[in-house]
Image: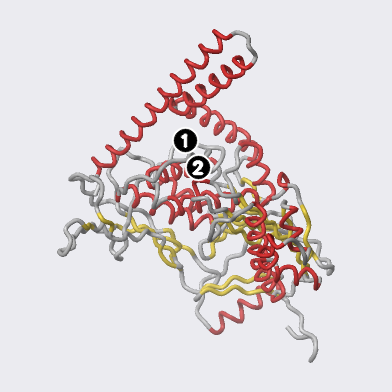
Amino acid sequence: MKTSQEERLACGYLAIYVDDVLAAAEEKVLKSFFKAVKKLWRCSEEEMVSQDAWMRFCGYELKSDGEGGFMLSQEHYVRDLLNRRQVTGKEMVPLPKICEGEDEEMCGQALKEAQGVVGELQWISSRTRPDVAYGTGLLARMMHRRPRYTVQLAEHLLRYLRASETRSLRYRAGDGGEDLQPMVVSTDASFAPEHEQFRSVTGVIIHHRGNVLQWVSMRQPFVSQSTCEAELIAFVEGFQDGESTSAVLQLLEVPTSKKLVGDCKAALSQITQETGPWRTRHLRLRAARLREAVKQGDWSIAHLPGAQLVADGGTKPLQGVAFREFVQRLGMEDVAEHVGDQGQVYEDAVEEAKVRSLWNRGELCSEGGTAMIGGGLALLCSDKHRRLATLLLTCGLLVKGWGGIQDRKKEEKDRNKDSNKDKGREPTKDSGSGTAVKLMGVTGKPQEGYQVGTGDKTQEKNRKDPSWTEGPRGSNGSATPKGLVNRETPPKPVTVRFEGGSVSSRSRRTKARHPCL
């Protein structure tokens, strides 16, 4: 809107996707805008974001918080996903402690199951659920090396979603001042975890006025030689993401300053200092562009303790209090019909997790055996109670060994179960059936949010090499696994289509090296 020949004043914002329009402005401006649009095109009736019900737009769900801000969620999609996969039980955190292990033998069925659930989780983690971004990324990176273990972790993550299906991002209204509001880019890195093939994991989370704008959880492209190098790579990644986000804010005429925070003082010194020993010259070269931006005053940097750093949740599976604090710093809240029931839901999830951990005999024996061995060694070093120390050491070794046997038996049982699924079992005719959920845009004709369609199973072999097989394909040519949680039923092919594309997995021809194939 122009108030004069020189001055321009923004009176609202528009987001357009094909024939759907989302407008943000004052109510009188919105009414006049849609009135003018309806004179030109035939449109559906517009929907207003309110406090009473969710308004859907391109897979997102929006609701007013009653205080001038908004809630952003995918509650209906999460609930539909949990119902289709028949998820039971609840968990407090997205992932348990990661167990290190060797790469598994190739199993096509387990790989298809892992690909299917990871695709569905990526639709959530990349839009409204930064709390599961690390977990989803880890599953995607691990599924080709350890598909069965990936399926187990995915079932755990689905149970966490069941305990937090109403969790939403809250965007609070600002004070409307014209002063520069800092855009804070928080970065962190976990150094060389074994299950990531010793490549560090970068976490970046960008806030503006306390609201989350962007989040990244990714594995670094190469092995870092030190924690300083890993953290410096994370700083540079956060700097690049912050530059792109600040450009969007500038386009929206939002005044802002840029600030980069992290918990590694060694990496911060490489950014601020231009000289140093020759052994760290490659680090200073990596930070040259960021150092230039800080020197020019475009960016400011600061140190923040790791316990207060929100990006820490994007680099490792946090547990207990640390994870709850991570969710609070993200600005996520549970939108429940009865607010008083939220505490009870959390307590129920805690009890279920405790009972489930007691039934895991292998893990319980491993932990108990380790404790006995530690106690025996402590008594042995004190030159007292040598008989008791010997007894504890012996019992600890026996218990730990028995726990390892139980773990191997469980793995063999799961492997046999997967093998039996592939022998002569065909999916039923109603595999993948489900209801199509319609979404209505603000203007334009109704659009499909996501639709569950039946996949057709075909299996053909390459004539040149009979040892190559191809998995079941859906109606659109993509592999369509279904049924991760209920492992007693045969896999059912299903294709999940969204209005922006498809997240169903695509199988690739894999050489048969296991009876599952």
Which residue is at 51% across, 22% downward?
368
Of 187 and 173, the residue lying toward us: 187
Label 2–label 1 contact, CB within 8 A: yes
Q: Position of residue 497 (x, y in %)?
A: 40, 62
Q: Position of residue 367 (x, y in %)?
A: 52, 26
Q: Residue 239's quadrant in the figure?
A: bottom right
Q: Position of residue 291 (x, y in %)?
A: 75, 68
Q: What residue is disc 2 on?
A: 162
Count of labels in the image: 2
Where residue 89 is drawn, which disc sits there?
1
Sequence-first tag of 2 and 1:
1
463 relative position to 259: left or right: left
Q: Position of residue 376 (x, y in %)?
A: 56, 16
Q: Residue 421's quadrant in the figure?
A: top left
62 relative position to 262: left or right: left
Regarding residue 367, the answer to whether it shows in the image is yes
Which residue is at 42% across, 24% downward?
401
Q: Could you say whether the residue bearing mark 2 is in a helix, strand or loop?
A: helix
What is the basis of the colouring in this image? secondary structure
Disc 2 residue type? Arg
